[in-house]
Amino acid sequence: MFRTHTCGELRHTHVNETVTLAGWVQKTRKMGGMTFVDLRDRYGVTQLVFNQDVNAELCEKANRMGREWVIQVKGEVAERSNKNPNLSTGDIELIVSELNIINESKTPPFTIEDDTDGGDDLRMEYRYLDLRRSSVRKNMELRHRIAFEVRRYLDQQNFLEVETPILIKSTPEGARDFVVPSRMNSGEFYALPQSPQLYKQLLMVSGFDRYFQIAKCFRDEDLRADRQPEFTQIDCEMSYVEQEDVLNLFEGMMIHLFKYVKDITIDSLPRITYADAMRLYGSDKPDIRFGMTFVELKEFVGGHDFVVFDSAEYVGGICAEGCATYTRKQLDELTDFVKRPQIGAKGLVYIKYEADGTIKSSIDKFYTADDLKKIAEAMNAKPGDLILILAGSKVKTQKALCELRLEMGSRLGLRDKNKFAPLWVIDFPLFEWDEDTQRFYAMHHAFTSPNLEDTPYLESDPGRVRAYAYDMVINGVELGGGSIRIHSSELQHKIFRLMGFSEEEAQYKFGFLMDAFKYGAPPHGGLAFGLDRCVSLFAGLDSIRDCIAFPKNNSGRDVMSGAPSQIEESQLKELNINITLPDIE
């Protein structure tokens, strides 16, 4: 046998046994006539001991080894005199009698340890080395456990796993598609799926009733910490269901995962409408681990000749408990924060409700102490609290106030990664208006069913129509979302028309789905969870990159392999693509 045990397996019960191990040299330490080597594999670390007095040649051979050399050793398990409680194998060590050097290694560009000295770019360039670190490996093991448990849970709920195509028809209504030229069909292109949406609806028409897939999806969009050009969804669809059925089943799945992965018991998920989420938090993915909800103040601040408030469409504030002691420097920092271009506020108004009951403000010139006291009462502020107010157009100001609220939550330590606050956001608008193109777009997608109560407004006031659409949000991150789908051809055609599609355009893009609906489509709905985001959340990571084996960077590049890259001119000719390639130096 190449090895009898792994490097994380040996315990006190193995003392006096002769075993064979194999792995990478993590660290070598020389102490007098003794050499100690930490041997690592996927399962853990075992300390090896080489004794100069017992076998000088073997000890000299060990002293020549460098980090990340691949070796095989044979020896006897002994009890350690200085036990290491931080290692699962910390009670024992291996007294080596045979050493076989399998492969030497160059010195790695960074240390293969949890607290590595390698930066993000360097680690991504040598990702195959980064994956040797136990902290990264644990993320991948967690990903495996979650994916495996999701499959088990859904199997018990009678879901059937079905693979859908990767090369599909381009339907550019959401994010940009990645397109793939077809060699055999000159001038035509496939697209990589942004989601399996149309195919899973077709599976419902096919009578599969309950479908799921852990599916690769692709979107050519701007990247950030929780986005990658390719990502993985837990994609699900069900027939003969209403919104409540979908919410209850997948709420149960998430409650099960919290217990299975984190041993956290969650009884149920609260629900909040989209309208209330925007009114109270300025976001459709609110972080409800802490309060500090918005209070609209327009009726309390008008008529005092303060043009900033009087001319504003919206005036809103948050109350930071216990922060009246903030210094001028701290308040200036908050002002600079909201004035950053990506947030876009023009300024910040503060009201300090001092512990002794006095009130100080940056707008004392326009408001009396009694006026400020009324504002404080409207904010439910107590002595010792700090009120922060922004004003301007409603949408932009709520967005800025949302960012300020999150910043204050972080500063006050209220966004604890070990605390989880999941909820459902429901009753999303069916449409959102785009000023640039002067047309309505589907807020989720074109196949989302309108709320039956609102269908009378489809023609007269489309912006008023709510959808049977829902998102699961945890700690301010949209973990997943979905909707009840339209299963009526007539209603689907009406939605296409309201979105500005001609009959010909709708038929060209979605005709195969519409044709399928003519053969008896059952009521159906579903959702998709982001597996990468789910793992990232449970692992307490700041970026989904650390739970993906080979991720792209913020420019969508794989710096390890060099993708994307140029291809040979002969390939371009075969595809009938005529571009001039720059010279490659």
Image (cartoon, grey):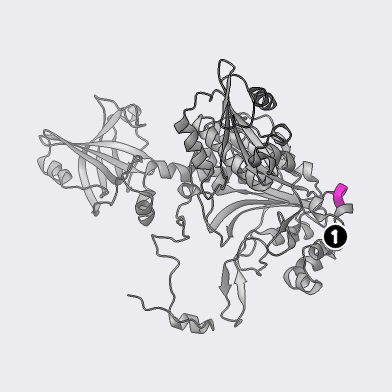
Horizontal and vertical percent position of residue 415: 54, 33
Q: Nearer the viewer, residue 19 or 404?
A: 404
**Crowding at mark 1 (Cα within 10 Å: few <14, some 14-19, many 20+):** some
Picture quadrant where residue 46 is located: top left
Horizontal and vertical percent position of residue 143: 52, 45
Horizontal and vertical percent position of residue 296: 70, 35
Range of the magenta residues?
451-455
* Residue 67 visible: yes
Q: SS for tag 1?
A: helix
Inspect the magenta stretch and tell me whether residue 553 lies in it. no
Q: Is residue 84 left or right of residue 401?
A: left
Q: Amino acid at mark 1?
A: Leu
Q: Pick the quarter of the image with the C terminus.
A: bottom left
In this rendering, the answer to whether 585 lies above or below 109 is: below
Give the residue drawn at x 78%, y 57%.
207
Q: Nearer the viewer, residue 304 or 555?
A: 304
Give the residue drawn at x 67%, y 47%.
393
Inspect the magenta stretch and tell me whether residue 454 lies in it. yes
Give the residue drawn at x 79%, y 71%.
502
Q: Main secondary structure of the magenta part?
A: helix
What residue does disc 1 label?
Answer: 491
